[in-house]
Image: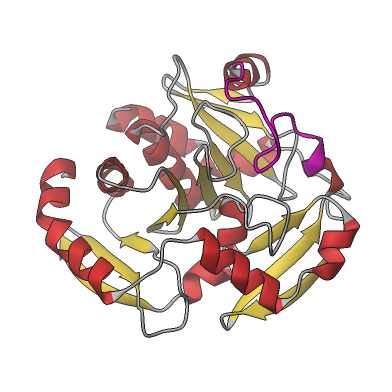
Amino acid sequence: MDAHDADRLLIQADELWPLLPVEEGLVQASRRLLAFGLPYELVLIPSRGQRANLPGMERRAFVSDKGGRIRDQEELAREETIVLTPNRFAFYEQHGLLWQAVGFAREAPVSLMEAGFRLAEQAGGGLLINSIGASASICQAHAHLVRAKSEVLARLSMRALGEARGLRVLATDPEAGHPGLVVLVRGGRASDRAGFVRALLDLRTSASYHVLAQDDSSWVIPRRRETVAEASPYALGAAEFFGRFVLPERETFDRLDRTAIELALEEASVPTSDQELDSLTELLPELFERSL
């Protein structure tokens, strides 16, 4: 996407939420609790259990490209390289999906992340990306655009690692209590953040990941387990790391407590450590060179 196309999409940012349906009655019950000192929400949304190819459950090794059908048949708005559709299995009350306009990509391309980062920032919402192996049920890369912001991400204790060209790179402080590695890229232009995030993902050693964004900030979360069965039978996705645990049935919704939430988040995450942060700091010159 060139700057002109991104700007054309952004002109529509103040009209974005009227395009997306409001899912009245989506959440049938909710409650809040603290885990690692951070505010998480648990919500009961039975429709989430109706998706095909449910992550974390028994599913086929290969499946058809449902993403291409959704993109082509359900579009609400289309630009040269980006398509917006509703999410028929929403986990927020106002919730759309962004896709690249043509072709197939398993990994989120820079153009998709750039458009998503810009729209989330301009429209005052959040962007969430799952990979296969981290709760994505569709093989084609797509981004969730939601009318919500994360209290959890905003309150993470981060350690500064370095900066260049207006981008600041931080990561979860190993001494601050949250056990998982989260990399924060803040400031600069959405295009620069997207390029840096893509470069970081290209150098990862974990198979699966999340990308989250709001305001002028983007977070990358490498994953090591999709489902932590000893805590919950359901796969953890970007929504859970954004701060909303989405449960499709009452028994698990009622049972999950702080201990289970902390266990799930810790076991699903790559552990943060001084060694991980030192390695990231050493990689920064290469990452900036590859992305800017």
Q: Picture quarter containing residue 245?
A: bottom right
Image quadrant in which the C terminus is located: top left
Report the residue at 29% width, 33% height from top: 3
Q: Is residue 9 left or right of residue 145?
A: left
The overriding secondary structure of the stretch rendered in magenta is loop
Closest to the observer: 130 or 117?
A: 130
Residue 56, percent from left and from top: 66, 43
Residue 173 drawn above or below residue 141: below
The span picked out in magenta is 48-64
Residue 145 drawn above or below residue 35: above
Q: Picture quarter containing residue 135?
A: top right
Asked if residue 60 lies in the magenta stretch, the reply is yes
Image quadrant in which the N terminus is located: top left
Asked if residue 132 lies in the magenta stretch, the reply is no
Color style of the picture:
secondary structure
Q: How many marks?
A: 0
Closest to the observer: 71 or 253?
A: 253
Closest to the observer: 245 or 180?
A: 180
Report the residue at 69% width, 78% height from top: 258
Residue 27 drawn above or below residue 114: below
Residue 46, percent from left and from top: 86, 47
Residue 111, percent from left and from top: 36, 32
Residue 127 drawn above or below residue 82: below
Q: Picture quarter containing residue 60?
A: top right
